[in-house]
Amino acid sequence: MIPVCDPNDGPGSLRLLEELTSNADQVQQRLLKEILTRNLDTEYLSGFLQGGTDRDLFKKRLPVVDYDKVKPYVDRIANGEPSTIISAKPITELLTSSGTSGGLPKMMPSTEEELDRKTFLYNLLIPVINKYVDGLDQGKGMYLLFVKPEISTPSGLTARPVLTSYYKSSHFRNRPFNKFNVYTSPDETILCSDSKQSMYCQLLCGLIQRDEVLRVGAVFASAFLRAVKFLEDHWQELCSNIRTGHISDWIAETSCRNAASGILKGPNSELAELIEMECQKDTWEGIVKRLWPRTKYIDVIVTGSMAQYVPLLEFYGGGLPLVSTMYASSECYFGINLKPLDLPSDVSYTLLPNMCYYEFLKVEKGEEEEEDGIIECNSNGEAKVVDLVDVEVGRYYELVVTTFTGLYRYRVGDILMVTGFYNAAPQFRFVHRRNVVLSVDTDKTTEEDLLNAVTHAKLLLRPLGCLLTEYTGYADTSSIPGHYVLFWEIKGPPPPISDPHRHVIEECCAEVEARLDSVYRRCRSRDRSIGPLEIRVVGGGAFDALMDFCVAQGSSVNQYKTPRCIKSKEAIDILEERVVGRFFSSKVPHWEPFKVQTT
Ligand code: AMP
């Protein structure tokens, strides 16, 4: 049973939160029983459990799995086999994750009922933020929300990103009115499939209603900053539209245009001047506060890979609190931040025990928190798996979930650290995603993806008689959009950066991009949320200097391996000082919505 959380009933919702967190173990046990009982006859579970629903049996018999074990089942459903191979309830859609497998988005099964669970979590966010910020019922939220393309599987199921699924659902579109959830963006502007028209109209509506805006946000920090950049590029046109009362003709998507026109109503030269005055100023520092003066906070996720955007958000936000409200994924929505005004570096999420069944693989960390660490095993070589209420403060874990949608003991890939408990429910800091070395937006490039792309690209150097001897990279997010920077040390005559070689290395940039996964290429070509990839060629010995630095920081000389991504400013500076040439990709990589393999 999914509990009902009425966002208009603050005290009732908070009581519910107390109950759930105080009885975390009981809720988890009940929930596992429900999942197992309900799905006992599925092909997957019956193969392991043969009718049992006992927690110990579940733990003993069911393997902890990665996506490669889930994929065959998902593919079979995508190709027309019944959902009952994994789930008693019909799988109604597939959610395309930003995590990829074989270059394509992983697809997570979902059911109609799961939308209720998501709505429950969204509703719970409201009383929590109301505890810390007053008067949010006195105005609107300017949330910049977008939908992405979807595909149809051979069996006719829709496959799309989880947020696209939610925004298109009746749960979002027919949401009951509640005074804390009034947005400046009409649904038609959010649901517009042309991302540029959608962005333009949402900003236009946000500017027109600026006096009512009490909070601004997007899902991830990168998306919000992209909106600020869009505003930087389009404020004159937006102001001209406000002045004349006429929306630019290129806004052609009818429902989006009509909805924005309904907000614009007519000419408003006074407002246009006010906005122009702010945008014309020499600096855009504090622009969010200046354009939306009643704003109390910026609601964006700034944990995990999004932490890199905190300085830019602070610059544009002029000191507005940055609030990361929730932790969720395509697999399931997990938890909420019970202290929304905490600094980004202190944010912890409390996993809600009624969302799915959580287990945790113990991870032994090395010196570097960002490194993946080693999964701890017992004397039989089996990974140590613990339950939600048994995690220990200060320790690192990898999250494993069993959901209502057909995932059983599935490794999500996120590494979390326990910071404390709220009642009996543990709270976690998001540390990083396993294997991921580069991320600018929702892209998650792994060490393997990068190696594969570089391996192909470096072949282009061969005709020049040059060899790639070392490489590493980092996500440069000092400007918007951010982009990948790869440092390459190249050996061989003639000097690799002279003019005839320039276009070859530019081609290498393009080749790396062409070989990266489909989420990277979508961000780069459709969403334009990642800029052209850059290769910085460094002089001979640069990577020796990097090794000297890492060893001086405590790495073992014998075990030293060139890191495939560098984060510390000092390490970047060491290579930066030795840069002899900078090259950018001059092609936008090809992207199209992927096709589901037919069996
Ligand atoms: P997706 O499957 O594309 O929906 O992406 C889900 C992933 O995004 C999670 O598994 C995390 O790695 C990351 N993520 C989601 N929420 C947060 C958060 N609040 N902080 C850090 N990372 C997050």
Image (spheres, grey):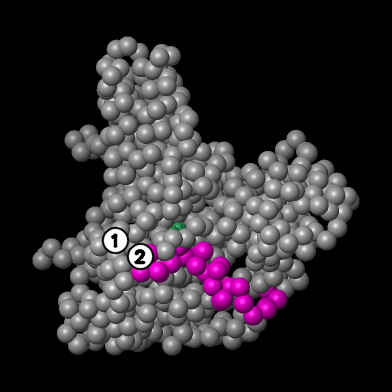
Screen quadrant of the N terminus: bottom left
User: In terms of depth relative to the viewer, which is nearer, 285 or 53?
Assistant: 53
Left or right, 235 with respect to 225, comes to right
Q: Quadrant of ligand 1?
A: bottom left
Which disc is residue 154 wearing?
A: 2
Measured as percent of width and height from the top left, residue 378 is found at 15, 65
Nearer to us in this view, 323 or 246: 246
Residue 292: in sight, yes or no? no
Horizontal and vertical percent for residue 462?
27, 22
Picture disc at residue 178: none
Task: Tell me the tag on residue 598.
Answer: 1
Which kind of residue does numbered mark 1 sit on? Thr
Residue at point 60% right, 83% down? 6
Q: Is residue 147 magenta?
A: no
Residue in the foreground of this view, choosing between 499 and 136? 499
In the image, which residues are magenta? Answer: 153-180
